[in-house]
Image (spheres, coloured by chain):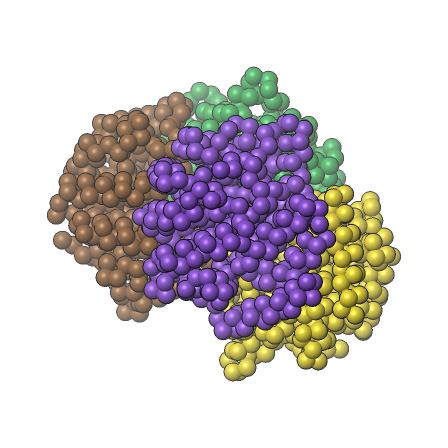
Chain colours: A green, B brown, C yellow, D purple
Amino acid sequence: MQSLDEAKGVYIISVTPFTDAGALDLQSTDRLVDFYLESGVTGITVLGMMGEAPKLTADESRTFTRHVLRRIGERVPVVVGVSSPGFAAMGALAESVMGDGAAGVMVAPPGTVRTDTQILDYFSGVAETLGAIPWVLQDFPLATGVQIAPSVIASLIHAIPTCLMLKHEDWPGLNKITTLRQSMAKGDVRRISILVGNGGVFLPEELARGADGAMTGFAYPEMMVEVCRLFAAGASERASDLFDAYLPLARYEQQPGAGLAVRKHVLAKRGIIASSALRKPGKALADLEIGEVGRLIERQVRRLAEIG
Amino acid sequence: MQSLDEAKGVYIISVTPFTDAGALDLQSTDRLVDFYLESGVTGITVLGMMGEAPKLTADESRTFTRHVLRRIGERVPVVVGVSSPGFAAMGALAESVMGDGAAGVMVAPPGTVRTDTQILDYFSGVAETLGAIPWVLQDFPLATGVQIAPSVIASLIHAIPTCLMLKHEDWPGLNKITTLRQSMAKGDVRRISILVGNGGVFLPEELARGADGAMTGFAYPEMMVEVCRLFAAGASERASDLFDAYLPLARYEQQPGAGLAVRKHVLAKRGIIASSALRKPGKALADLEIGEVGRLIERQVRRLAEIG
Amino acid sequence: MQSLDEAKGVYIISVTPFTDAGALDLQSTDRLVDFYLESGVTGITVLGMMGEAPKLTADESRTFTRHVLRRIGERVPVVVGVSSPGFAAMGALAESVMGDGAAGVMVAPPGTVRTDTQILDYFSGVAETLGAIPWVLQDFPLATGVQIAPSVIASLIHAIPTCLMLKHEDWPGLNKITTLRQSMAKGDVRRISILVGNGGVFLPEELARGADGAMTGFAYPEMMVEVCRLFAAGASERASDLFDAYLPLARYEQQPGAGLAVRKHVLAKRGIIASSALRKPGKALADLEIGEVGRLIERQVRRLAEIG
Amino acid sequence: MQSLDEAKGVYIISVTPFTDAGALDLQSTDRLVDFYLESGVTGITVLGMMGEAPKLTADESRTFTRHVLRRIGERVPVVVGVSSPGFAAMGALAESVMGDGAAGVMVAPPGTVRTDTQILDYFSGVAETLGAIPWVLQDFPLATGVQIAPSVIASLIHAIPTCLMLKHEDWPGLNKITTLRQSMAKGDVRRISILVGNGGVFLPEELARGADGAMTGFAYPEMMVEVCRLFAAGASERASDLFDAYLPLARYEQQPGAGLAVRKHVLAKRGIIASSALRKPGKALADLEIGEVGRLIERQVRRLAEIG
């Protein structure tokens, strides 16, 4: 299987399907995994922030991950979010999922680390905890409150050989990609994979800046897969036409907090998961929101027909 | 002139033009004001966050505002941002600009107020400071860190008769508009104008929820003016077609921090202001960014031609 | 056993003893529990922030709590911190420890809740999760970033009959105690126990304002026990003499982050726990700090001898 | 006059006296300045955070500073806080007060800078703005939200020759002093003055770590002056005895937000300023607080008599 540092294309951030009563819905999980694979994703990430990871018990986290891993088998790599307030829980979950067949884990820093040195110290602790386990650095300041300078990412990559991928979702973040790619091109820092987040709303520009693809969620993963494919084939205008057709909905789904309800609503509407339920304190979409999403999808369908 | 609580359409958030050397550029200011008026705006707001207000001295703030007010005369109302760490400076600036002919002032809360009571107490101090001066409440949590619940806004409107407008830029914020509009419809709270911010990237949905228009900036204010006009005329699909054509650039201009450089770059490229210079610590666009903006504008022109 | 809403005296926030290698040290735990009981505490709280709760795995949390509960038996009530990013993990831990004999649990809000309504909604979810389990509200803005107004605490107490105690550690917070006690005296809100935190550095004033005692940690719990006893007996000057003798060290131990290392160092020096080790990312005291603590203890001993 | 980088002893952070009606009280200012000088301070800092600087208009800031400078003449150096949301206002105020005879200015970073690079970039802008004006770096994370690593302070000192002093009020911050002093001793970084803040509540330990004195406020500046003097004379135990006698009140005055009202109340009670009024949104002490302060002062007097 592809090593994480050579990852390209779309590592979809999987939602975690629940029943209306709030239990894990493993039947929907099977359909969801199949749907993602049919959409052409090159990897799947579970237990991310948008996978409602913090709302699961330790046991549920293991059960869900094991189920996904069994369904996927060897087809694509699976990355598992293991961010945790403490290293002990992080290490226990990481060891468990690697034993079940995960390709690696993903870690975002806690909001308490601030200075460059604190960030480096924190990830030094992560690396010690994870041992030989390959891992992905999640750089998402809007959610974590932690701003990681490009030079700090470079230092991290240099110091920690098991850091194989950057999930890049700084905002704005285009120049950060360029800075890192230039350092890698010059050989100042080892080349790792850079997959972008933020619901993909800057995907065309990010690919042009040197991103290898996306690791994020969107209710239409096939768009991100196709944009990556077209871009790699040199058809960037066609890629942007496709992207622009989905942008009004992507923008709507990108609303912090509310976005996951949109995503689950659309996935349910598309027949992939049985229920759009979020665990509390997540909230279902209001009727007006359902109407807005419906209208955006209608316009999207029309626009896709126009561009052929 | 229209009272602020009956405002509709687009109150453009004006940039503050500087020369390359960083001085106020009053010639460009004249062209800019004329351009905004020709674009069909129904009001102009100066000294907003995107007007680099905190980077001006107290004297420059007065000079720039007076210049704009003289150029505009009685044509449209001018709102002046007076947010300040202290009430004394806020009051002094407010009194000065009202004497020069402003229609009202705008205030955002400082990041130190948190609870509902602290917010109400703060604006009670604002009201005492401003006396009879009409003012606009700026609700922009991403920038201020202050989250104001709809019920708190309602209490504010009830308690302070001089609060005539909400500059709404919560994110997500659609349900907040609906909640407030419903309270106003039921007569629970006095009706005030709601103009939306966030670069207008949710303008169609916000108008449908009951917003009266926008008070924000975008390098193509004519789009926002036309979207508001079409929407008011019942042509919401046409409004959305137009909106969607500009959305890829609007999304790009909406990047926090970097966005103002994009806006000034485009305004300079359109020949409206002489220099795209920002005062420090603002930064000019990098070459790659200039290329990206250029490509987005080319695609925008093409798409506008398609929709006719 | 005393119900939590009638709690008085000192509920000590227990440290979690580790071996130098970082494993749970259950032998030291036995000595620690015995020491706390001999010091005269009226309750023990485990898995608090200063108990390094987030650094334990779910299994370790249960093991440690069960061990403490067995050692204590029926002697004093045990409260267990169950704050968690999600309700599922909170509920699972709470159910487990109550089954093992805990008297109640403690919850602090996550940093993401801000407005009064968000706070009330969050604790409504907590109450639904906990069912009939008695719980303590931890109000610690310096650590959580959440500011809870007295009126919101009153609403919480009114709405949720299982909320039996406030762990009060706002700073400044004296007027909050007074406001709440006055509401309780007038019968506007049910009387609950108020125990104070912040290492007890405002204990004399807080007792005078109506606090029932302290729920916090300090390497000399006997001081807090005796200050509470003297105060209840009307000997407030003598209580302050004692308090003042310990204040230089209490102030030193109250340094955020570094304080826990001080506390464990002193507990180890006193022969109560075998190792002063903190789990990472906690750090041991530097030599200069050990010297400073030693000097403060010497002066403390001298001053205690003076006051007799 | 002593250069700022050789400053020792106490640079008192001056309050700004107002009348009950909220106007600048220049008569009280004269008495206050005289009192500070008679207390033995070696410098005075005006327009600090505890000087309610953000509550003054630009004109008032100049008037107050000029008045203080005239009263003091050449007796001790005066430092003026010029922190501002923008460089233009900072530069204008700095130039004005230096023209009036100030010895230097003081700057704290805005909460928006986070990474090491952002901090260095920000102060590079400060240095460019200030030109040849000597300045003091205020490092106060609790108030600013900005954490500045010792290595970043060292880089700043190295890069900017006009940075002559550190107002150190990190918490905890003892090891930061030691790290910086060691770098200075080894010649890795130029020696500058380090004066400590935080109301002086760690003064004995900070002096032992290498601080040159304090730049902070306390209603009894004579205590800080004497502690510095005794410490310099090698009488550290006697210094600590004195410090400990004042610590209960210092702790009370150190409460964030509420502390300034305590300080002004005591200064008014001591007959130095006419009114304890704070400008809004500052609040006067409640009756219970006045009682608590009174009791603390009584105990302080008693304890001072005991130690002779």
| Image position of A59 (left or right of A206) | right
- Residue C256, above or below A302: below
Work out whether residue D233 or residue D115 is closer to the camera in this orientation and state it.
D233
Residue C84 in sight: yes
- Nearest the viewer among C244 and B60 is C244
Q: Residue furthest bottom?
A: C186
Is A136 situated above or below B147?
A: above
Residue D98 pos. (x, y %): 39, 38
In this picture, residue A41 sits left or right of residue A98: left
Quarter that holds the C terminus of chain B: top left
Q: Determine which quarter of the picture holds residue A31.
A: top right
Q: Which residue in the rendered view is the most extreme toward the top?
A: A186
**At 64% across and 27% down in the image, what residue appears?**
D187
Please tell me whether residue C240 is drawn above or below residue D111 in the rendered image.
below
Residue B252 placed where, x, y %? 38, 34
**Residue A41 image position (x, y, % from top left):** 55, 34
Instruction: Look at the picture and state if D99 lies above or below D259.
Output: above
Q: Classify residue D242 as left or right of residue C270.
A: left
Kindly identify the residue that appears in the image at 52 percent across and 37 percent down.
D2
When asked about the image quadrant of residue A93, the answer is top right
Residue appearing at x 67%, y 31% in the figure: D185
Q: Left or right of C227: which side holds B34?
A: left
x, y percent for residue B46: 26, 44
The residue that appears at 65% across and 56% down in the rendered structure is: D243
